[in-house]
Amino acid sequence: MARMKFLCDADRCIECNACVTACKNENEVPWGLNRRRVVTINDGKPGERSVSMACMHCTDAPCASVCPVNCIFSTDDGVVLHSKDLCIGCGYCFYACPFGAPQYPQLGNFGSRGKMDKCTYCAGGGGSEVPGSGEEYAKYGANRMLRGELPLCAEMCSTKSLLAGDGEVIAQIYKERVVKRGYGSGAWGWMTAYREDIAV
Amino acid sequence: MRDLLARARFVIAAIAIGWLVGFAVPAVAQQAGATFEPQADAVNQGTLLKEFPRIQGNINQLDPQARVLIQPGGRTWDYFHQIVLRWIGAIAVIGTLAALAAGYFLLGRLRISAGRSGRKVARFNAFERTAHWVTAVSFVVLAITGLNITFGKALLLPLMGPDAFSAFAQYSKYTHNFVSFAFVLGLALIIVIFIRDNIPDKTDIAWFKQGGGFIKSRHAPARRFNAGEKLVFWGSLGAGIAVAASGFLLLFPFYITNIFGMQIAQVVHAVIAMLFIALILGHIYIGTLGMEGAFEAMWTGDVDYNWAKEHHDLWLDEKLAKGRGGPRPELPSPTPAE
């Protein structure tokens, strides 16, 4: 069974934000919510590095572990989804997530937050809606996985730095790159998310 | 003319060849072994994470929290909340209940040795009692709704099913957020009202030395509040302020602190709340089951004369000394003559 992962090749990312725009558009993410973001470290200095970051769909996801109502779960593909019907907007998943993936629409007072929203790997949502339906789209965004398609952020990446797909396949691609060019700053977040490193 | 053209072609050719040679030389030099790695001075993720607990950079979006690229501490906080805190809570709550049950079955209820006299002494006035009950009721509500966050999905979710439990947890969260203000108000009143009578003094050392009233043969002296009650007061004051302050930070997330600050606030709030619950369980026990004649002090405001003499003798003396010329203690009503 394929185990879906993300890999952002920090040596190729040019901070164009195409992934951010693609995700926003495809899933009609409301204003103020950012499922995907590009973080630039050492901006303007030697060793500047940009990484595209959204939900990494972790193995043994800490968000799922800490949720007080168990609304977050992993599918067989390894995609971490959640149910907005069960979510109480407590914000604990954001405290636990090493990548800052959960987003909240800030709908209430006293940090009430509203229903958590996050990258779904373009695989619809974890609620009771029919996969691929209009209701599911309104709540969670696109379900490209149903058509056998990969997330749009990776498809739209201008330099193919953001890779999405089966973990074995993208790890292999990354290894080939590192060998070819002779250097690689490592697969960002893989140790924290999947408890494995890409040894080259 | 032909000479000129021939010369011109020769010059152009010479320049062209010169350019080609000029370009070829560096290429040859590169192939010779001077490799250039544009990212060689970049630090990889593992090294960076060893130096900093959080890696952050610049982003295009407006939310400052999104600047954090990775904070592995989140997994540690998850471990704390799911495992460490549950142990603390289980030991604090169940352990305390077990100890109190043991105390009740071994020692039994602390009776008034001389029996009830039927005469009453005024102990707490209406304002004091109101402040106490506002705090007490809000504390119980906050404790239950708060424990639901830690233990709800283990204990209640299997019984209620996901939809009902989510609805319950949602209302629980709102209740907790709003009732907290009543608790803080009540706590502030209690501190202001009772702090004067809770200052530790020499009587408390004597009270401890005499066994705190648990050893029947000895007499433990006390003023308005004995040393045990003073411990409850100061414990509640400290725990209450800690829980209120950390709770306030949790109520307004990221207004003052960053992600690490929020995690610390949650840890402080949860751990101190669990210990506070243990303390108050003890307080509730003594005030209800554990000691005869204690509950009416806070419910009606009056206590039995013999109870006061046994447990708060110095306070009773002070009251009687003041009472010369003041209202008399309530005498039992005489049976009407038929």
Image (spheres, helix red, strand yellow):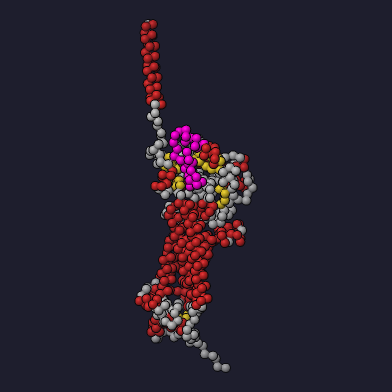
Between residue B307 and residue B122, name the one nearer to us: B307
The image shows residue A173 at horizontal and vertical percentages of 52, 36
Residue, far left: B202
Q: Is residue A104 visible?
A: no
Say whether residue A46 is visible: yes
Identify the residue at the far bottom of this view: B338
Q: Residue at x 53, y 54 (%)?
A: A65
Decide whether residue B182 is among the magenta residues.
no
Q: Residue at x 50, y 60 (%)?
A: B86
At x 38%, y 11%, the residue is B10
Place of residue B291 in the rendered image (x, y in percent of width and height, measured from the top left): 49, 78
Q: Is residue B242 left or right of residue A167?
A: left
Residue B88 picture location, percent across and down: 48, 62
Nearest the eye: A155 or A182: A182
Dividing the picture into quadrants, the one containing residue B35 is top left
Q: Is residue A134 left or right of residue A89?
A: right
Q: Position of residue B251 (x, y in %)?
A: 47, 58
Q: As displayed, is residue B62 above or below residue B3?
A: below
Name the one closer to the observer, B45 or A159.
B45
Query: Number of marks in the image?
Result: 0
Q: Is residue A177 magenta?
A: yes
Name the quadrant containing residue B325: bottom left
Q: Which residues lie in the magenta part?
A: A173-200
Q: Give me the residue at 44% from left, 86% from top.
A: B328
Q: Where's the N terminus of chain A, which quadrant?
A: top right
Relative height, residue B42 to residue B133 (above, below)? above
Q: Is residue A151 above or below residue B167?
A: above
Is B86 in front, or is B136? B86
> Residue most toward the front?
A200
